[in-house]
Amino acid sequence: MGAGSRRGHPDRGYEVDLDVNEIDRDRPEPDALAEYIARLALADIFLVILCEEYLPSGGGMRAWLFEEWSRIERMRDWGIAEVIAVHRSGSLEDDVNPFVRLSGTLDAVIDLREEPDDFSPVVEIFGRWSGRKLPESRAREIANAAHAVIAAARAKRWDDCETAFVDLSQLPDIESTEEYWLASVWRNAFRDDDDVLRDALARLIEMNPGIPSTQSAATALWLADRETAAFWHFAGLSETRSLWRGWAHHVMGEFFRTRGAWLAAHNHLSFAADLIERQSGQPDGVGDRDMADALAEHIEKSGYVIARGCEHCKAKFIAGRVCVLCGVQDTRAESDECSFCSHPLVELDECPFCPICRSGVRGSPFEGGNVQIVTREVGGRYSLLSGT
């Protein structure tokens, strides 16, 4: 089983861990097992290699498979990781038994049974990393210099931010790195030169940043009161299974609340509270929960007629058109595009998934999946809407 997070694989932009390389198959050391299971929390994607060994027709499951799969299943349920099966042999008809429960857990299946040794279909769905390949010491130097800029901007220490940015700019060939343009976004988000900020954002997007960099750039825009620009980025993050998903829904809920879109605000804040509480194990989403409850009372008093609800996140919708990305029922839009995020508006009864939590509607082709609208070159082409 492979666990990956996009942090620097030299060919694909991912760092990959393979469980059998980390833990003894039959006699795992407790400390090694605990360390590996803890490290799973950093993963965005899990590749489950399915063969007879995992299936009822096989035998000899690893002694520690239960611990590993329990964490994976929980992270997937929390909405912070995706699970992709690579099916090499065996039958899935009877499901995996007794430790691995695949029903409703897989986001995609890649069938290699005809050519089990040809892994090219697996490799190709992740795109190819087009960024620079740097030695570890050089990458660490750039990361530390960029972090100094971002930390100073976040703390509003403008002189320190300028000094750190000058230091960063003097590193060799620095403008070819994602870190430089992310730091530039943070530096310029709080300045008055909109053209420079737009250029920095455009250059960052050209580099196909990973989820952490996208979240960081969106947060910079949000903290700099550039809410409309931030909203567009957070809307894309809100459908990803990542550690930042709860924060994205929180921001979107606050965005809609301040604009009087009560139903959308309630849906996003309620889901944000669920995600944050599940991820942390603590009631950290209590602020969102209280606000969502207050909005629910307001919605009830306002006489909304609920036409559909989501059985997963409990979102509520009225009849009419809904945005397929941000989930708002945009009555202001005169076209077929959402006036908030520019994505398509469709009739509610024609949307086969929940526009908030992205779960496929029961009986639809997307049932049990996490539907993604925003296609990403790296880590996004296995989206259910992409047909792969």
Image (cartoon, rainbow, N blue to C red):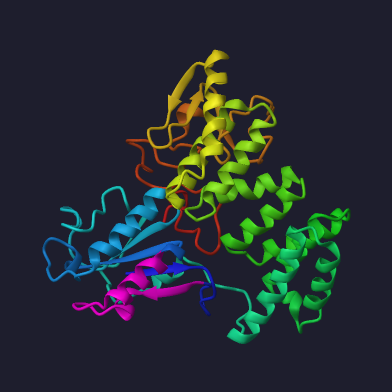
Q: Residue at x 50, y 62 (%)?
A: 379
Q: On screen, 342 above or below 159?
A: above
Q: Residue at x 73, y 43 (%)?
A: 227
Q: Residue 92: horizontal and vertical position, in percent?
A: 20, 56
Quarter occupied by the C terminus: bottom left
Instruction: Give the magenta range.
Output: 14-40
Q: Residue at x 62, y 64 (%)?
A: 209
Q: On screen, 343 above or below 11?
A: above
Q: State left or right for residue 33 relative to residue 235.
A: left
Residue 244 appears in the picture as rendered: yes
Q: Residue 232: horizontal and vertical position, in percent?
A: 66, 46
Quarter occupied by the N terminus: bottom left
Q: Is residue 338 magenta?
A: no
Q: On screen, 95 above or below 210?
A: above
Residue closer to the observer: 289 or 343 = 289
- Quarter where residue 82 is shown: bottom left
Q: On screen, 287 above or below 41?
A: above
Q: Residue 362: horizontal and vertical position, in percent?
A: 34, 35
Q: State left or right for residue 314 relative to residue 100.
A: right
